[in-house]
């Protein structure tokens, strides 16, 4: 090679600079967690504010890294809504925790791409093993372990897990000669939008939303009727999504009753436990998902309530054969001895993406750092805080609780009028001191209070109650 013709090698931050800035940024994150409580919970800026501060063109030459860190405070932070704020009662939690963030950093540093077992055996083996641990920790059917006929895989989101289930069920049905345009997927009216989106993306011809009972669970009798009607109309029922802990109110579909219908009718049963699945680490909540052995697939999000920062969604299948049959690919450049031996898992065949990052490290570190006992205490603490708030709302004639609250979400409205509920939603939000979610149930406004942020303590819930009490 002619050395003179070669350009200069590229320049990087030196490892010393990386150390210095890295240490400073760990301090920055720790300081953030310490001071987040003093910040307004939701970002108060007008649309375009952040973008207006960015230069029109990308820099031609590299800047001192210190500038980037300074802009975190001046440009980025005003546009941050603080999901890590202890008065975060909106949506569901999205917790970051120390072991999770540190593992995330290590995973980025290793820069591993774990599409095949052979592209980093540790990434695959730790993932399989930790997901098998979780089968025991959550008392899921033991056949779901990778050491049995099922198996777990990490995905980016519950939406991806659900889409994957929909795609596998469609593939199976298509192999029997059924046209996707005649396929029907079922879920309750309270199902998460990801079911509908997934069915659309997967090309199902129809999605049927089944009515719920007063407790916000799917009416299995109505499901049966809908299936019979669709068959009578020449359509092909294929897929049922049952939810444990709906997003709206944490309603619970009757898994066993729905599962028996699915068995009888030969339909795929997918369980969406994105939020409430985390609570199953505590035995006292498990009766809510009685009948799991009838399910074909299951998803829950440790990135919601189990101290693993986004993204980390778990997807289990009862039988991995149809999943792999549907999604496996083998271009010549991915051929390798380990895969051909059949002795290893290649997770590229378990979901839509080929490439995959080393997400399992943060789940592994979180479980090891907290221990199952630490995670159980955390769930129970949040549930106890929620039940305490619920009993205050329940005994105050100004308020009415609108749905059962078995986990750490309570939904209520003002008894006076819907206008009073809407006013309260805004009055509390406008203080900037807490975040909660105004929503609707049966066409009427309601308020969701989700208690599950890692730093939330009793005093924060007291603070919320004081606001409700004062502004109602
Ligand atoms: C949050 C939630 C989802 C979506 O989760 P993503 O990981 O954001 O896709 C799906 N289902 C239920 C019941 C949820 O609460």
Image: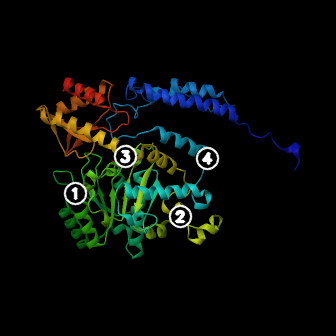
Residue 9 pos. (x, y %): 78, 41
Give the residue displayed 25% in from the left and 31% down from the top: 425
Residue 325 pos. (x, y %): 48, 70
SS state under label 3: helix
Task: Give whichever of discs 4 and 2 has the lower sequence position.
Answer: 4
Residue 400 pos. (x, y %): 15, 37
**Dot 3, how many residues are within 10 Å of its Cα: few (below 14), some (14-19), or many (20+)?**
few
CA gap, disc 4 to disc 2? 21 Å
Residue 201 in sight from this viewpoint: no
Q: Is the C-beta of the residue carrying label 2 under 8 Å from the nearest atom of ligand 1?
A: no
Of discs 3 and 2, which sits in the foreground?
Answer: 3
Residue 365, placed above or below residue 318: above
Circle 3 residue:
373
Circles 3 and 2, Cβ within 8 Å, touching? The answer is no
Circle 4 residue:
110
Circles 1 and 2, Cβ within 8 Å, touching? The answer is no
Residue 256 or residue 103, whichever sits in front: 103
Circle 2 residue:
345
Residue 469 pos. (x, y %): 19, 26
Quadrant of the frame with the C terminus: top left
Of discs 1 and 3, which sits in the foreground?
Answer: 3
Residue 467 in which image quadrant: top left
Circle 1 residue:
218
CA gap, disc 3 to disc 2? 30 Å
Judge from the rendering whether residue 17 lies leftward or rightward of residue 273; answer left or right.
Answer: right
Task: Give whichever of discs 3 and 2 has the lower sequence position.
Answer: 2
Residue 419, placed above or below residue 313: above
Residue 384, placed above or below residue 196: above
**Dot 1, how many residues are within 10 Å of its Cα: few (below 14), some (14-19), or many (20+)?**
many
Residue 314 in sight from this viewpoint: yes
SS state under label 2: loop
């Amino acid at each position: 090679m002619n050395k003179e013709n070669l350009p200069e090698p590229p320049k990087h931050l030196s490892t010393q600079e990386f150390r210095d800035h890295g240490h400073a940024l760990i301090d920055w994150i720790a300081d953030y967690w310490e001071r987040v409580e003093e910040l307004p919970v939701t970002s108060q800026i007008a649309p375009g504010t952040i973008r207006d501060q960015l230069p029109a063109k990308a820099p031609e030459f590299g800047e001192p890294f210190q500038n980037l860190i300074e802009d975190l405070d001046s440009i980025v932070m005003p546009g941050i809504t603080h999901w890590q704020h202890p008065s975060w009662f909106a949506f569901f939690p999205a917790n970051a925790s120390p072991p999770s963030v540190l593992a995330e950093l290590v995973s980025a540093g290793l820069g591993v791409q774990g599409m095949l077992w052979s592209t980093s055996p540790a990434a695959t083996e730790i993932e399989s093993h930790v997901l098998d641990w979780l089968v025991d920790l959550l008392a899921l059917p033991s056949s779901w372990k990778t050491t049995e006929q099922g198996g777990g895989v990490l995905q980016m989101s519950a939406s991806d897990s659900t889409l994957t289930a929909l795609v596998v069920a469609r593939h199976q049905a298509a192999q029997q000669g059924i046209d996707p345009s005649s396929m029907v997927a079922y879920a309750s009216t309270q199902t998460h939008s990801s079911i509908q989106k997934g069915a659309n993306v997967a090309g199902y011809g129809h999605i049927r939303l089944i009515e719920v009972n007063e407790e916000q669970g799917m009416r299995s009798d109505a499901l049966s009727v809908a299936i019979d009607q669709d068959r009578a109309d020449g359509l092909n029922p294929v897929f049922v999504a049952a939810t444990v802990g709906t997003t709206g109110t944490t309603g619970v579909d009757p898994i066993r009753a729905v599962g028996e219908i699915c068995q009888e009718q030969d339909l795929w049963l997918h369980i969406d436990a994105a939020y409430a699945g985390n609570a199953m680490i505590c035995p006292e909540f498990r009766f809510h998902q009685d009948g799991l052995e009838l399910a074909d697939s299951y998803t829950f999000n440790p990135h919601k309530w189990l101290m693993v920062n986004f993204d980390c969604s778990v997807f289990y299948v009862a039988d991995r054969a149809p999943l792999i049959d549907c999604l496996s690919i083998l271009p010549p450049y991915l051929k390798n001895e380990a895969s051909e031996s059949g002795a290893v898992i290649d997770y590229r065949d378990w979901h839509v993406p080929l490439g995959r990052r080393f997400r399992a490290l943060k789940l592994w570190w979180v479980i090891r750092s907290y221990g199952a006992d630490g995670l159980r205490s955390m769930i129970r603490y949040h549930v106890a805080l929620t039940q305490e708030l619920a009993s205050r709302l329940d005994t105050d004639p100004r308020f009415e609780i609108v749905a059962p609250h078995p986990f750490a979400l309570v939904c209520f409205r003002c008894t006076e009028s819907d206008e009073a509920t809407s006013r309260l939603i805004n009055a509390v939000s406008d203080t900037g001191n807490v975040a909660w979610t105004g929503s609707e149930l049966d066409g009427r406004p309601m308020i969701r209070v989700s208690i599950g942020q890692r730093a939330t303590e009793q005093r924060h819930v007291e603070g919320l109650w004081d606001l409700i009490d004062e502004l109602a």
